[in-house]
Amino acid sequence: MSANSAGERAVVLGASMAGLLAARVLADSFAEVVVVDRDELSGVTTARRGVPQGRHVHGLLARGQQILDELFPGFTQRCVDDGIPTGDLGTLRWFFNGRRLAPAPTGLICVSAARPLLESHVRTAVEALGTVRFLEGHDIIGPVVSAGGTRVTGARVQSRAAGSSAVELAADLVVDATGRGSRTPVWLGEWGYARPAEDRIKIDLSYTTRTFRLPDESILNGDLSINPVASPEFPRGAFFSRIENGLCKLSLTGMLGDSAPTDSDGFLEWTKTLPVPDVYEVVRDAEPQDDATTFHYPASVRRRYERLKRFPAGFLVLGDAACSFNPVYGQGMTVAALESLVLRDHLREGVPDPLRFFKDIAGVIDAPWEISTGGDLGFPEVDGKRGAKVKMANAYMAKMQAAATVDGRITRTFMRVAGLVDPPQALMSPRMIARVLRNARIADTGEVRKAA
């Protein structure tokens, strides 16, 4: 072991993207890292049962892509070499409120891979570390706690093979990365601890997705994706992306119980109802490669572990198990990547103190949570508190999106903030506010634009 090792073994529950990135940083501080998952993982490049959202269009935000290159040097180039399309985030075809944002280069790379393939690339890179072992095809029974309940000392798991018995994996640290279905709140109650409070925004979102092959990719005019984003005025949205192997994937999004049909005719007719015709014009003559599937996402949930007064040592929670975001904003994988950097920092001092760790990842979660929940609360039908801050932010965001239709510099700043590279304050400087207000008026009134 290295001199700064935190212990002999760490166990990660769940081979999600959060679990894989946690394993990557844990490998620097533990002699062995064991990643446990109920699914088969070896050689898998298709959607897994444990990741039902994996069938749908996923966005790896720019900051997430940067972190993957930091943790796995050369990661993006390996994706390119494997035929995964990439492009500048600001030059994609973005539509807000039915109007296209003026394209502008941001210097930020969009890696346009289907989620299973992207996950496979990360898993391969983690396996190459040599000290990480995957225990696939195993159910997670739960953490093992000490006699006094003050410390987690390992995890009980059981192979899904017939006739198997549960086994205990001793560990110096156990990390829950099992996603939004995490049972940690239940386990805490069983151990005599308080359960974390939850912030919940019910959105009743649906993704209905189909994969296509275009007869002629020139119809895209070189664009990597076409994204009419849902808004209160136009609540139906879509994400159309070129992916690997010359294929394209289209996810139709419905809010508040609205959902696109899965039959071919109904799917195509629903596409016609989007606020712009661009997506329909691309897929109407495309060749479907699979049947449409639907994924329902009832609510965004943030578990407030940072507010707890007591928590067992040797146990952490991260990724969707801590905060599950509306997937429309594409924040989940990138926030998990940011949390892995927080974990790396804490590991420099040994096994992390859970409450300190939770307070620090809360700082990572705050901005994306405000972005996504603020946007969701822009829909009048969504239940939730709308204080002055939310109302002012949504009013300003509407003007900013209008201004970005005529000013690429605003698009650039917006995409860097949405990509979690720059802080939200970048959109709120006096100079930017003046630029937004001026160009929003131009966009809404059709004034002849003066040179900036």
Image: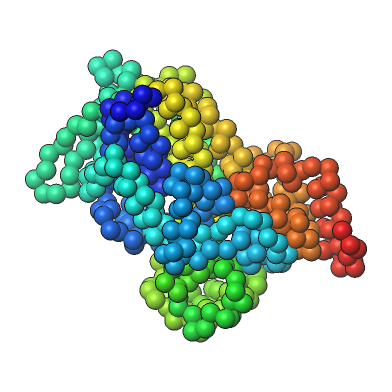
| Nearer to us in this view, 119 or 405 | 119
| Location of residue 161 in the rendering, given as x and y in whole percent from the top left corner | 14, 49
Tell me: residue 43, above or below residue 419. Answer: below
Query: In this view of the protein, can residue 230 be seen by the observer?
Result: no
Give the left or right position of residue 21, taking residue 417 as reference. left
* Residue farthest left in this picture: 163
- State the scheme by which the image is colored: rainbow
| Side (left or right) of 57 relative to 272 | left
Q: Is residue 29 left or right of residue 259?
A: left
Note whether residue 349 is visible: yes
Position of residue 87 relative to residue 154, above or below, is below
- Residue in the picture at 61% in, 59% down: 89
Q: Which of the 4 image quadrants contains residue 386?
A: top right
Left or right? Give the position of 222 relative to 427: left
Q: Residue 44 occupies which quadrant of the picture?
A: bottom left
Residue that extends furthest to the top in the rendered view of this protein: 148
Does residue 99 lie above or below 163 as drawn? Answer: below
Q: Nearer the viewer, residue 275 or 240?
A: 240
Image location of residue 31, percent across then percent down = 29, 31
**Residue pictured at 42% horizontal, 27% vertical:** 347
**For the point 38% across and 40% down, which residue is it?**
24
On the image, the x and y values in percent for residue 22 come to: 40, 39
**Which part of the image, by quadrant, shows the N terminus?**
top left
Residue 188 percent coordinates (x, y): 36, 27
| Residue name at image x 8 percent, y 45 percent | 163
Q: Nearer the viewer, residue 149 or 129?
A: 129
Q: Quadrant of the C terminus?
A: bottom right
